Image: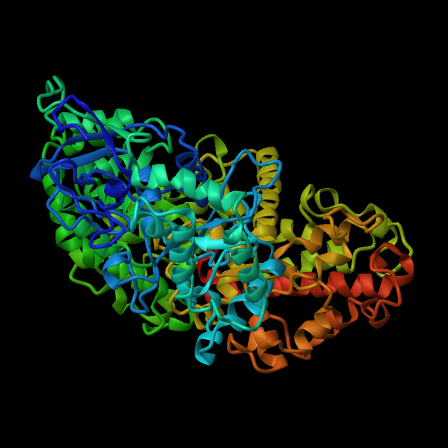
């Protein structure tokens, strides 16, 4: 390897790239005079963001000798700070900063990460159970014919310990495949009964393998076998691999699916032709990286002419430009990097605020807007908008003539007051020990509020800040005040057509509120302000009817409808002609209109008044928006099931980077009435099922959040059987009786809706004596009616639980 010089191009070896993150490992030689590059991430860098498929494809490219692009390095400068890499730091002092190539270097390091090795070889972000966050395997069976990969690499993660699909790593396994992996694979291979009882998200990755692999082996075992002796023959490498495989805790398991997989592994490594010898031949070059293969590193010259317009590190400008390609760094992520570029200690302070509320870039942006709010003039009546990247850069570098001291104020806020502001806001949202704790949001909804409704989150944070300025304790409010606060926030976040302008409508009142009125700010007067129409008669917040109005509307439009011959006649045209849009959404029902006249019209008619035609149109718009939002509002479902979510997953932290994606949650959404009665095994719709059933079937009235492992994906069980028989999987989640399962599902145990759920699937249908598509036939009109009643009843009860629990009635005029 050539001596590194500024402006030069140097080939890097994979083991040395891995050594930037994984130190003191026998398979990774330490840097020496011929390998002078030890790179770390500058503070401005973001975290690792590559998905499993990208990691798998990169390793296929590496093994096949494909170029994987150059790494861009700059000489190390203390002032640029250090960003923690995903798997740790090099054991020796760094001499370069890695500007571009982080995702590739992290994917390379994963191949050298030995989850079964010494503690010094494991990720520094491990929890108390010493579990790594990901493991890379290679499947010694041929790739799918349709794949463009030659070698099948497989990533397993904490969120998906069973891996993704072998044929497409962008797709998660089906629930049935997950259940099979747990019950027929991982658990039977565990010798410790206590470990067998662990829920999936607590199983160490040392005890799992990619579930749908054919002959999987940890890639690091192959690499270590090769690197221990670069001249070893294929037989010698195979022997070394066998010895390493014997250290797997499940290698000698006698139960479950592993013994058959082990046999295929042994057959694969015994073969003199095929994937195994080819892999060894290819890896021998790429793992040890002789002259045949290298990753070029481009070294930035020491001297770079500064920008003429900004007093900023020119590396920051270069970083921004480089990161406009690949997995793009933009918006809040890019602004966070800009802040870290000039304030390298930012992550140390920002990440103190992150637990269960938001990830760092969003926290920084919320903190930025709070500081801008502090700097507002008295006549500024609107909350600060999210600054653009160019504007944020000017603010951070003191180039904004109106706010030259912004950076000093931001850093002071984050290091001092900010921690308390964010911490108290989080407590108000999720703490079950404060007054009104039974009404607190589960952590996932607090995280959702910050990420999907940042303007609403800003309103809460600004209120906390104002309370603290007034020497009042935000968490010292009464139970009723807290319930109204949560109701106000969720009403805007979940139902407002324009939450940004709804917040703007009340911002001035919060800004000017006296200390005596602050504890009661989240009350009817402020909510009425949010309900007023905006410019051009725009609907901002959504009027929220009482549960009684909703129930009356559903009765008139559905369960007691007389249209098309009526709901109560099994053979009427109602069952073929009812449509969600035509019969419920398009024309607001009379019950809605009367309620609107009594509670909302006077708000919209203030000032110059509103034209009656406009008023009629707005009622229709408001009803259409409300009914549609409620129809699909899974957040409401999670709120109603909050106590069980907290019991099932007490350690689930949605703010952890690996959990940000929705598919990484430890639960799924289960249809209470099985989907199999409406769709075939291939996913096609069954013929002649009434549209009213299809529409209501996919509403939140028929959904429940359910532990991923316990979800019955086969769909064979009727609601009655689901609620009557508690499975072994469900017992792992504190459900031991039928009543537990009903309570967890928010279904009334032996109440009227229970009877309807039980009658929704006739016994002869569940027994297989009658057609699965029974809902297509008028002969099963009683079951049709019971199903729709059960779903609509639960639909209304979900709304009532939230409405009454969070005192929405106290907010509405």
Q: Where is residue 56 in the image (x, y as percent from the top left)?
A: 45, 42
Where's residue 715, x and y in %?
70, 62
Q: Which of 526 and 747 is in front in this view?
A: 747
Left or right, 45 with respect to 485, comes to: left
Q: Please name whichever residue, 656 or 596, is drawn nearer the observer in this view of the structure.
A: 656
Residue 33 seen in the figure: yes
Figure disc tally: 0
Q: Position of residue 146 (x, y in %)?
A: 61, 36
Position of residue 458 in the picture relative to residue 418 (left or right): right
> Quick one: 701 or 278, which is closer to the camera?
278
> Where does the N terminus fall, quadrant-wise?
top left
Q: Which residue is drawn at 33% across and 39% down?
A: 103
238 over 187 or under it: above or below: above
- The residue shown at (20%, 54%) is 24
Q: Residue furthest bottom?
A: 737
Q: In which quarter of the image is residue 97?
A: top left
**Residue 385 seen in this snapshot:** no
């Amino acid at each position: 390897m050539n001596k590194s010089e500024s402006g030069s191009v140097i080939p890097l070896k994979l083991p040395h790239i891995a050594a930037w993150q994984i130190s003191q490992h026998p398979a990774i030689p330490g840097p020496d005079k011929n390998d002078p590059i030890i790179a770390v991430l500058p503070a401005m860098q973001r975290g690792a963001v590559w998905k499993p498929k990208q990691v798998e494809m990169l390793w296929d490219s590496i093994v096949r000798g494909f170029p994987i692009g150059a790494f861009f390095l700059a000489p190390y400068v203390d002032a640029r700070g250090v960003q923690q890499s995903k798997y740790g730091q090099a054991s020796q002092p760094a001499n370069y900063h890695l500007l571009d190539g982080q995702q590739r270097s992290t994917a390379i390091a994963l191949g050298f990460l030995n989850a079964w090795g010494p503690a010094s070889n494991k990720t520094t972000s491990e929890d108390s159970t010493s579990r790594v966050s990901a493991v890379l395997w290679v499947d010694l069976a041929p790739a799918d014919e349709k794949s463009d990969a030659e070698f099948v690499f497989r990533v397993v993660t904490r969120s998906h310990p069973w891996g993704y699909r072998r044929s497409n790593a962008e797709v998660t396994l089906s629930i049935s495949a997950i259940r099979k992996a747990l019950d027929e694979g991982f658990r039977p291979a565990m010798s410790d009964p206590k470990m067998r009882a662990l829920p999936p998200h607590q199983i160490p990755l040392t005890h799992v393998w990619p579930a749908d692999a054919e002959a999987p082996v940890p890639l690091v075992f192959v690499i270590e076998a090769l690197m221990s002796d670069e001249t070893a023959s294929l037989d010698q490498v195979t022997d070394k691999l066998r010895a390493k495989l014997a250290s797997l805790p499940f290698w000698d398991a006698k139960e479950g699916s592993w013994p058959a997989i082990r046999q295929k592994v042994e057959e694969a490594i015994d073969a003199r032709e095929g994937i195994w010898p080819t892999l060894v031949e290819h890896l021998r070059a790429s793992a040890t990286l002789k002259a045949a293969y290298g990753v070029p590193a481009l070294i930035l010259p020491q001297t770079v002419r500064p920008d003429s317009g900004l007093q900023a590190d020119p590396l920051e400008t270069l970083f921004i430009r480089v990161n406009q390609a690949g997995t793009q760094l933009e918006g809040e992520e890019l602004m966070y990097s800009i802040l870290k570029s000039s304030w390298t200690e930012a992550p140390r302070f920002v990440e103190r605020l992150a637990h269960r509320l938001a990830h760092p870039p969003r926290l920084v942006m919320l903190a930025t807007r709070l500081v801008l709010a502090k700097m507002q003039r008295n006549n500024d009546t609107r909350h600060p908008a999210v600054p653009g990247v160019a504007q944020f850069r000017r603010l951070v570098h003191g180039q904004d003539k109106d706010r030259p001291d912004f950076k000093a104020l931001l850093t002071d806020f984050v290091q001092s007051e900010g921690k308390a502001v964010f911490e108290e806001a989080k407590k108000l949202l999720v703490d079950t020990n404060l007054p009104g704790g039974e009404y607190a949001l589960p952590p996932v909804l607090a995280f959702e509020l910050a990420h999907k409704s940042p303007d609403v989150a800003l309103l809460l944070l600004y209120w906390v800040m104002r309370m603290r300025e007034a020497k009042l304790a935000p968490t010292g409010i009464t139970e009723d005040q807290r319930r109204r606060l949560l109701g106000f926030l969720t009403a805007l976040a979940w139902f407002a057509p324009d939450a940004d302008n709804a917040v703007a409508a009340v911002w001035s009142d919060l800004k000017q509120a006296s200390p005596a009125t602050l504890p009661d700010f989240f009350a009817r007067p402020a909510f009425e302000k949010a309900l007023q129409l905006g410019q051009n008669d725009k609907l901002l917040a959504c009027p929220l009817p009482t549960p009684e109005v909703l129930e009356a509307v559903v009765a008139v439009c559905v369960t007691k409808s007389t249209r098309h011959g009526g709901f109560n006649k099994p053979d009427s045209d109602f069952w073929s002609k009812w449509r969600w849009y035509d019969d419920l959404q398009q024309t607001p029902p009379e019950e809605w209109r009367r309620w609107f006249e009594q509670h909302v019209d006077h708000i919209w008619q203030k000032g110059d008044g509103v034209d009656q035609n406009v008023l009629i149109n707005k009622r229709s718009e408001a009803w259409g928006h409300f009914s549609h939002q409620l129809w699909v509002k899974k957040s409401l479902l999670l709120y109603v099931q909050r106590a069980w979510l907290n019991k099932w997953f007490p350690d689930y932290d949605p703010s952890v980077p690996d959990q940000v994606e929705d598919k990484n949650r430890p639960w799924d959404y289960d249809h209470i009435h099985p989907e199999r009665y409406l769709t075939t095994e291939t996913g096609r719709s069954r013929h002649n099922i009434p549209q009213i059933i299809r529409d209501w079937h996919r509403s939140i009235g028929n959904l429940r959040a359910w532990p991923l492992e316990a979800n019955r994906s086969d769909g064979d069980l009727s609601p009655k059987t689901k609620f009557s028989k508690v499975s072994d999987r469900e017992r792992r989640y504190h459900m031991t009786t039928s009543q537990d399962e009903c309570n967890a599902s928010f279904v009334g145990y032996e109440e009227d809706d229970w009877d309807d759920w039980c009658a929704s699937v006739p016994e002869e249908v569940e027994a297989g004596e009658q057609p699965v598509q029974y809902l297509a036939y008028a002969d099963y009109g009683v079951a049709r009616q019971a199903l729709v009643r059960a779903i609509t009843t639960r639909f209304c009860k979900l709304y009532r639980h939230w409405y009454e629990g969070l005192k929405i009635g106290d907010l509405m005029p």
